[in-house]
Amino acid sequence: MFKLFSNQNENSPSQPKRGRVVSLMNQKGGVGKTTMAYNLLHALHAEGHKVLGIDMDPQFNFSLLFGIQNPQKSIHHLLVNSIRELRALHSDALLSEVIVTNERGIDMIPAGQELSGFELTVAGINAPRQLILKKFIEKNNLLDHYDYIVIDGPPTLGLLVVNILCACDGVLFPFIPDAFSEQGLQNIHDVLMDIEDMGIVQSPKILGYIPNLFEGRRKKSREDFESIKNRFSDAHIFEPFNNRAHLAKSVASRKSVFDYEAQDFRQLQGQFRDMVESVENQLRQ
């Protein structure tokens, strides 16, 4: 197995891991999950952290925000290469060549459409299929090199989602206050319960819920928001992200809110900084 980063503490098993893995999940699409992951990654970087993004969505929008289109090698190839039983399918993809670094110094492992066939590719292996991503991160010592790894997951249920949840320390749930998002959140919660029942890894901590595209002047939005708050009272509810043109503008330009100095972006920057502070505090506990 190729290792990009040497582990200087391999002889000290008691040494605590340095990095933490955070994922953003919701079975419901269109809730701003990728937008939140992209800006969280930049917010962590703005606070001085060494960060890595991993795109685990076959739609690869996280990668597109980094300006990465149709990469020849992606996370799919790296994961397949990490499985000994699939030696016949191994490619010449090296982690050092797959990682892309943007102008701010933020690293990204992109996804591609081939990731949609991941579940079928690994269907016949004997190794625990739920732990492929976790073991990939461990074998390459990524948690010794990065303070935070932020994973954008697909808006589905299945093996990719299980792999992400088994690999991460904490999970954030972006949602739009409506009945469809509420059901999507419940479905992801059911997967978390399944992981806990399996007992092969510690279930990730629920770091909070991120209300997005919230229209507080609409009665139905307020009612749906209250319903979700009451149903999922197990974690922090972040300040709602209103239906802001500024957030849409930054995404359309493939920029984070931290790329803008205008006063209009200060509130959004503050919200993501608050999110970083909350994530850091919770993962220290």
Image (cartoon, rainbow, N blue to C red):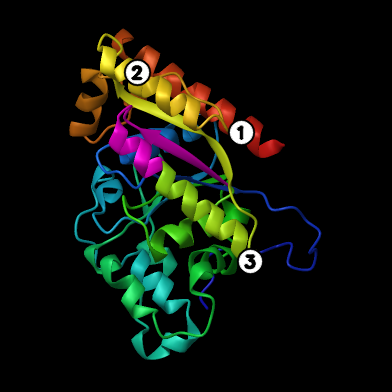
Front tag of 3 and 2: 2
Q: Is residue 104 above or below residue 109?
A: above
Q: Which residues are magenta?
A: 170-185
Q: Which residue is mark 3?
A: 200
Q: Nearer the viewer, mark 1 or mark 3?
A: 3
Residue under the point 32% across and 65% down: 74
Residue 253, quarter of picture: top left
Q: How many other residues sit within 10 Å of disc 1, few (<14), some (14-19) or many (≥20)?
A: some
The residue at 23%/32% (across/down) is 251
State which quadrant residue 134 falls in.
bottom right
Q: Is residue 162 magenta?
A: no
Q: Percent position (x, y) of residue 192?
A: 52, 52
Question: Dot 1 lies on which element?
Answer: helix
Mark seen at residue 280 = 1
- Rendered residue at 60%/53% (across/down): 203
Amino acid at dot 2: Glu
Number of marks in picture: 3
Q: Amino acid at mark 1?
A: Glu
Question: Label 1, label 3: how many angstroms apart (C-alpha)?
Answer: 25 Å
